[in-house]
Image: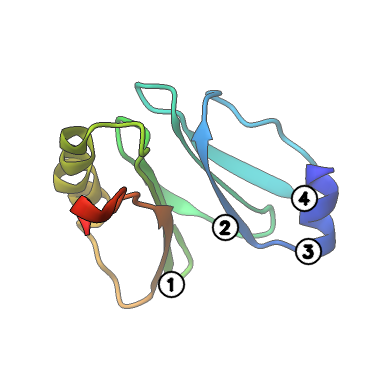
Amino acid sequence: MFKRFLYLQDTDFLLMQEVTIPEFPAFAGCKAYVNAGTNQNGTVAIFHDTMRSEKWTRCPRGGGIAAWFGFLYLVKIYTSSGNSRSVRELFCNEGLTYILRIVPQHFITGGDFKCVLDSTGA
């Protein structure tokens, strides 16, 4: 069903989170780049196999990946709400600044920051 969805939607990019496997199953027409990270709770970017990607960067803990697709820099960022505030702050201070150390003119970011978890975080 997942493969059919990607095919019917003619998907160029799909960004996923909470990936617990070090390798994503391959299927026709797509490539995948996984960053399971040290805590096995990471991210994956799936993209059309005709697209050329290069210079992949990943956060060691699994919360982010980024790559160049021609002139476009694609960034996937994720931090789990199950993590403590200090863990999320560490990700923003270290992981996020590492993956965004290059901020080109053209980039797309997708993610789930879960920064505001209740009214006290607003």
Q: Amino acid at mark 3?
A: Gln
Q: Residue 73 location in percent, x, y?
A: 40, 64
- Which dot, 4 or 2, sits closer to the camera? 4
Disc 4 from disc 2: Cα separation: 13 Å
Disc 4 from disc 3: Cα separation: 13 Å
Sequence order check, earlier mark of 4 and 3: 3
Disc 2 from disc 1: Cα separation: 11 Å
Q: Which residue is mark 3?
A: 9
Q: Residues within 10 Å of mark 4 (few under 14, many from 20)?
A: some
Mark 1 lies on a secondary structure that is: loop
Mark 2 lies on a secondary structure that is: loop
Q: Residues within 10 Å of mark 2 (few under 14, many from 20)?
A: few
Identify the mark at residue 71; answer none if there is no mark: 1
Disc 3 from disc 2: Cα separation: 20 Å
In the rendered image of this protein, does residue 52 appear above or below residue 71? above
Sequence order check, earlier mark of 4 and 1: 4
Residue in the image at 76% along x and 54% along y = 6
